[in-house]
Amino acid sequence: MLFNPRHQWIVAVDSDGCVFDSMGPKQIRCFHPEIIRHWGLERIEREVRETAEFVNLRSVWRGSNRFPALLRTFELLARRSDVRRSGVPPPDTRALRRFVESGGPYTPDALRAAAEREDDPELWRVFEWSRAVNERVARELPSVPLFAGVRETLEEIARAADLVVVTQTPEEAVEREWRENGLWPLVREILGPARGAKKEMLIMATQDRYAAGRALMIGDAVGDLQAAREAGVAFFPILPGDEPASWERLRREAFDLFLRGAWTSEYEERLVAAFLNRLPETPPWESST
């Protein structure tokens, strides 16, 4: 059962890479080394890291759920000419692709159920990779820092609007990070991957609960933008690489426009254009050939 609205407005916010400066460290120190270890890709470590960093941090797939992002990483890796020359065979993606194309939910429990149903060693490998990533994050990154300006902005938002977290990170990890940083009292609810895709979460949180024009999504990934558009929710982007300035603009300018009903499609399109310019679809090693 969802929270009962206290305000006339609702603001949904992503967590990793948006509120917390955690996406880069988690990917580089935890996700990517475990990819290399679980699939035995030490001979092409550089190519794996470069591909995974592009997918998860610097492309249109930034912020994707870990399982579709892993599939995309392996697909791009298989297309690389330097990987083909290395003689290292790319990972088998057939079972992972079936799981991703099933439509979700993309949770460890759903993956485990699929692995048990199909008795597929590759799905079990993905499951073990995911579990190892969680253990490594807990061990190596026990705390994550906030971006500058986040605390003040979220405190201001929570005074006027219901604040919810919409994320593809497991809910227990998100709750721990928000509690450790003293932000938990500001949050009405965490909506995580067990609730479905972000679009579904936004519709669930807003439909028949808030008037038109009273819902805003804050995110740092194209998936956040797409979810907001599909759910009929306004979108404010946190620009990768300019996070503190983005939060400052939200606090000093954008949130006031939202509350006053002065938010326009033209204003949002200017924000989105600058945002999309930072997240290409074609990796640099392909665009330069």
Image (cartoon, grey):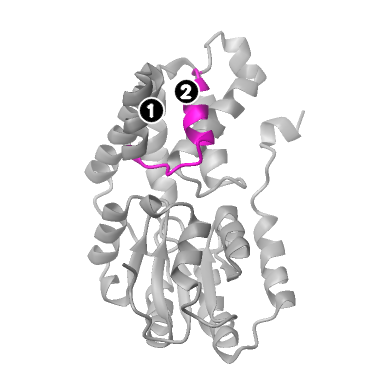
Q: Residues within 10 Å of mark 1 (few under 14, many from 20)?
A: many
Question: Sequence order check: which comes first, mark 1 or mark 2?
Answer: 2
Task: Tell me the kind of residue under disc 1.
Answer: Val
Which residue occupies 49% across, 76% down?
Answer: 208
Q: Which residue is mark 2?
A: 95
Q: Position of residue 25 (x, y in %)?
A: 39, 46
Q: Which residue lies most toward the top here?
A: 87
Q: Which residues are magenta?
A: 91-108
Q: Is residue 223 left or right of residue 33?
A: right
Which of the pair 150/192 is nearer the observer?
192
Which of the pair 12/43 is nearer the observer?
12
Q: Which residue lies most toward the bottom here?
A: 260
Which residue occupies 51% across, 68% down?
Answer: 218
Q: Is residue 105 magenta?
A: yes
Between marks 1 and 2 in the image, the one whose residue lies nearer the viewer:
2
Would you say the residues marked 1 and 2 are in contact, meaning their CB atoms lie under 8 Å apart? yes
Label 1 to label 2, Cα distance in Å? 10 Å
Which of the pair 61/100 is nearer the observer?
100
Residue 258's quadrant in the figure? bottom right
Mark 2 secondary-structure assignment:
helix
Residue 17's quadrant in the figure? bottom left
Q: Position of residue 251 (x, y in %)?
A: 50, 81
Task: Tell me the kind of residue under disc 2.
Answer: Ala
Q: Position of residue 44 (x, y in %)?
A: 50, 19
Q: Which residue is mark 1?
A: 126
Give the quarter of the figure containing the C terminus: top right
Q: In the image, is residue 280 above or below residue 116?
A: below
